[in-house]
Structure formats: C-alpha cells, structure tokens
Image (tube, rainbow, N blue to C red):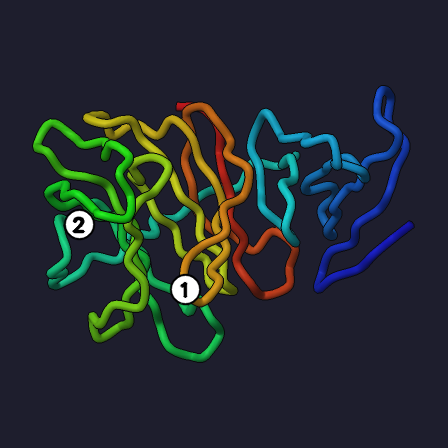
Amino acid sequence: ATTTSGTTAIVDLAAPGVATIAVLFDADGPIAWRPSDDAGGWLPDGDAVWLAGTWWSLIRRPGLDATDSPLASFPYGDVITSSAADLDGDGSIEVVVSYRHPARAIPWDPRPVPTDDRGRSAHLGVIAADGSPIWLAHRIPHPVGVVAACGGGNVTLGYTEWGDEALVAATAATWSGFGFTLAPELKGLASVGCIDMDGDGVQDPVVIRGP
C-alpha cells in the first residue's frame, strides 16, 4: 500500500524478521521506517522522528539547527532553556520554557520533590509572547535541558540528570491546550530539534542519538 503526503510517500514493504515495514520516501529515496504494526511497543534504537503519533527510525541523518529563544524576563523561576513556535495554530507565538525554582510543598501532592544541589525543582511551562502564563507544570518526569518547539502542536524535549547538562533521554510532546501528552521516551545520549521530515510544511520532532 502507498500513502502520499506533501512531497513524500509511505510504502508498506516486506522485511526479514518483521511482518511488514512502512517506509517514508521522498524524491531522494528512503527517509525513515517503522513496523507497519507497532502495537508491541516497538521503539527505534537510533535516530528518530515523531510523525503522526508514532516514532519512526531515521534512515538519513538530518542536521539540527539551534532552537533556543532567550527570554528577556521570566518571573516564575530560573530559565534553563526556552523555544518559541505557534503551538496551537492560531497565528500567535507561544514560548515553551524549562525552568527551576526553590522546591515547595504542595498540599495535594505529598510525593517527595526531586531537587538539584541548589534546592530547586524542575518545571516546564508555556507562556504567551507577552509573557503571560498559559500553563505551568507542577511536576515533570525529568529535568529538561533542551526544548525545541516545532509548531503544529509538537515539541521535542531533551532530558538531563540532576547536576549534569548532558542529555540522557528524549521525547516528543503534543500540546493539548493545557499541558502536554508525552510520547514514549527514547533513552540514551541525544540531541533534539525540529525538521519537516515528511514535506507537509510542519516541522516534526527529531532525536539524533549519540554524543
């Protein structure tokens, strides 16, 4: 079966050890692949792109551009990194911010709050271009060291350990209007960014594995 989208096509092919695989092609050849039926929780072990709600394994390694959008001010904590894009398609720019502030107890969440060596907890937020808050997370799975806002509702997140700037895992996140739905996490050293891999005019979350 063949499905076309923008300047690309997806073709289902037979492959050894896998019932069938879906391969994304453009005019220069294959771009990425995944099992046609990945209900078993398959995840790529190399470079990856998040397309249409699933991870694909990249065949061609793209270059990544810097995505940081420095903020003039942010009153909710110490900014680790930030990136701007139109998340909801309304024509206005939103800014996704990874930040930390002194940890504080929350009455409705008695779980211990992990902190860095300065006693700060890690958070993620979305603010409007004028700085007004849209959503500020109380708790996130890991500290976020890199944010790449792709637009089209998608963001790529690079996770770090406490006290270390190296990325140790990555994921894609889809904006819901008030919070993010996280894709399955890809563990290991990585770089993250956004590239339009399927030629539909919208940038996609990309994870490049390795140091």
Vertical comparison of 108 with 61: above or below: below
Viewer-nearest residue: 25 or 158: 158
Q: Position of residue 37 (x, y in %)?
A: 80, 38
Residue 89, image x, y percentages: 49, 74
Residue toward you, 79 or 206: 79
The local crowd at label 2, few if under 14, some if 14 to 19, many if 20 or more residues have their Cα within 10 Å, is some
Q: Quadrant of the C terminus?
A: top left
Residue at 72%, 51% (x, y): give it. 26
Viewer-side residue, 176 vs 208? 176
Label 1, residues with CA under 10 Å away: few <14, some 14-19, many ≥20: few
2 or 1: tag closer to the N-terminus: 2
Which residue is drawn at the image coordinates 35% and 30% (left, top)? Answer: 167
* Residue at figure coordinates x 63%, y 51% from the top left: 53
Residue 166: percent from left, percent from top: 30, 27
124 is higher (above) or lower (below) than 19: below
The residue labelled by disc 2 is 79
Q: Secondary structure at mark 1?
A: loop
Tell me the CA gap for discs 2 and 1: 20 Å
Disc 1 designates what residue? Answer: 178
Q: Is residue 40 left or right of residue 177?
A: right
Of labels 2 and 1, the one closer to you: 1
| Residue at image location 19% in from the left, 39% down from the top | 121
On residue 69, the disc is none
Task: Give the residue type that dot 1 points to.
Answer: Phe
- Where residue 6 appears, as percent x and y from the top left, is 71, 64
Where disc 2 sits, the SS reads: strand
